[in-house]
Image (spheres, grey):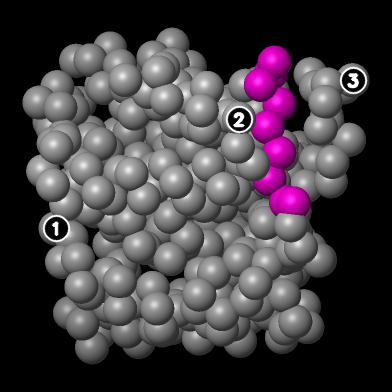
Amino acid sequence: MYTLVRPFLFSLDPERAHDIALASLDLAAQLGLHKPPQSSQHIAPRTVMGLSFPNPVGLAAGLDKNAAHIPAMAALGFGFLEVGTITPRPQPGNPKPRLFRLPEAEALINRMGFNNQGVDVLLSNIRSCKHQGILGINIGKNFDTPIDRAAEDYLNAFRRVQGLASYVTINISSPNTQNLRTLQGAAELKALLSALAALREECGRSQGRHIPIAVKIAPDLSEAELDDIADILLSEKMDAVIATNTTLSRDGVSGLRNSQETGGLSGLPVRKRSLAVIKALHKRLEGKLPIIGVGGISDADSAKAALDAGASLIQIYTGLIYRGPALIDEICRALD
């Protein structure tokens, strides 16, 4: 069915199409018109971060920033959902237009800038839907928080969301918040993760459980930077690394319409680099820390490639835009 409605959606502004598609999925879920395919319910189940995943295919952060569409997303058959990125205070994000399609490359460029309604709205949405599956909450800093005070935002957001999160993702790799990627530097990353680890222990004692933390990194990192990050993730006892976010590179899209737009590039052009980062991390981490692979996964073969490269789980977003919900079932069937 998606192949029939996609031309209409692609005729609209991408952000407008995004809103219409989510509203349609919400309505279908409310009316009980679609339920998770049986093939996706318990295919290749696995335990990662101490959590039991019914299948390894997850929704990447960015599609449901405010956790407003959880029932609709769950009905598509995902093994887990990740919502956000959420910031402590609401913010509008960057000026529109800020989302662009590159159909010839099955890619998107976005410079959304962590547009979201703030942590209070996200928590209200989560409580109201009473989701029973695995839910990750992706957190970031507000755009007007000075970078030298970024840890305050992450600690604030973590404290607020940890009670409702299966795991919390620390987003330090979006290219659309000024200076955010400097937090991937060795000294900055160690300080931030050390503070978060201490808060996790404090919150965990009150909850009586371990609260997993995943760290989402960029694809545009050097070998030396990956070495430093891997060492710090292990030393600070993080629970997973998500590889990768969008790229600033324009390899594979040069000359295409919209390729000159600023922002992060996702979809097929980032697949090669994301896979290389997964392989490099797998070698460095030696199985001591699970990897969640994301970037350019658009079919069963690319999903298998990420898992074979060392990922324990995968996430999709841009592939879902171009292929539709059938992509989830396709991957799960191939893994069966």
The residue where tag 2 is placed is 11
Q: Using the numbered discs, state the Cα–Cα distance from disc 3 to disc 2 in whole angstroms.
A: 21 Å
Classify residue 66 by image quadrant: bottom left
Q: Are marks 3 and 1 in contact (CB under 8 Å)?
A: no
Q: Which mark is residue 335?
A: none
- Percent position (x, y) of residue 59? 39, 43
The quadrant the C terminus occupies is top left
The residue where tag 1 is placed is 132
Q: Nearer the viewer, residue 173 or 319?
A: 319
The amino acid beneath tag 1 is Gln
- Percent position (x, y) of residue 40? 18, 28
Mark 2, mark 1: which one is toward the viewer?
2
The amino acid beneath tag 3 is Gly
SS under mark 1: loop
Q: Earlier in the sequence, mark 3 or mark 2?
A: 2
The quadrant the N terminus occupies is top left
The amino acid beneath tag 2 is Ser
Classed neighbour count for the residue bearing mark 2: other residues with Cα under 10 Å, few (<14), some (14–19), many (≥20): few
The residue where tag 3 is placed is 255
Region in magenta: 97-105
Give me the residue at 56% from left, 84% from top. Answer: 89
SS under mark 3: loop
Q: Is residue 229 visible?
A: yes
Give me the residue at 71% from left, 26% from top. Answer: 102
Give me the residue at 43% from left, 55% from top. Answer: 64
Q: Is residue 81 visible?
A: no
